[in-house]
Amino acid sequence: QVQLVESGGGLVQAGGSLRLSCAASGSIFSINVMGWYRQAPGKQRELVAARTSDGMSNYAGSVKGRFTISRDITKNTVYLQMNSLKPEDTAVYYCSAHLVSRYSSSSSVYWGQGTQVTVSS
């Protein structure tokens, strides 16, 4: 069993900051990519940011320069520092991990339960 547990969402005014955390636990052999997606009401889930185990990061154009993704490899944890938040950042944010479990030889994608981020104008 593998679990991804997110924390750090909430309500913030436009221009404010929030920091999301996501910890992966369970029967994990290795994690390649950890990242964050978001889904706003009526919209498709979209990639926000992702970071590989060797330190490469990728960001959606809409968040570049405002959001920063980081990982603590030793803790199987990924963070998303969100600054200069805008109302259009309002969404449910989901953590994801491409990992190999101790009971599999191939990589699978696991998801967290989601955390709500609401930015008021």
Image (cartoon, rainbow, N blue to C red):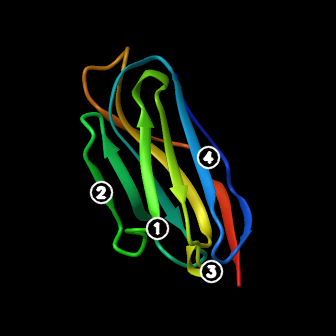
Give the Cα distance between marks 4 and 3. 22 Å
Q: CA distance from mark 4 to mark 1?
A: 24 Å
Q: Nearer the viewer, mark 2 or mark 1?
A: 1
Is residue 47 rendered to the left or right of residue 40? Answer: left
**What amino acid type should be assigned to the residue bearing mark 4?**
Gln
Q: Are marks 3 and 1 in contact (CB under 8 Å)?
A: no
Question: From the viewer's perspective, is the residue at label 4 or at label 3 nearer?
Answer: 3
State if disc 3 and disc 4 touch (CB < 8 Å). Answer: no
Q: Earlier in the sequence, mark 4 or mark 1?
A: 1
Residue at image mark 2? 58
Q: Quadrant of residue 64?
A: bottom left
Q: Dot 1, crowdedness within 10 Å: few (<14), some or many (≥20)?
A: few
Local SS, label 4: loop
Residue position for label 3: 87
* Circle 2 residues within 10 Å: few <14, some 14–19, many ≥20: some
Residue 106 versus residue 103 in the image, above or below:
below
In percent of width and height, residue 113 lies at 61, 46
Q: Earlier in the sequence, mark 3 or mark 1?
A: 1
Where 115 falls versus 60 (above or below)? above
Name the mark on residue 113: 4
Question: Please, what secondary structure does the residue beneath circle 2 have?
Answer: strand
- Residue 7 location in percent, x, y? 66, 44
Disc 3 versus disc 1: distance between alpha carbons? 13 Å
Could you classify mark 4 by the number of other residues whose Cα lies within 10 Å: few (under 14), some (14-19), or many (20 or more)?
A: few
Give residue 106's position: percent from left, percent from top: 25, 27
Amino acid at the residue labelled 1:
Arg
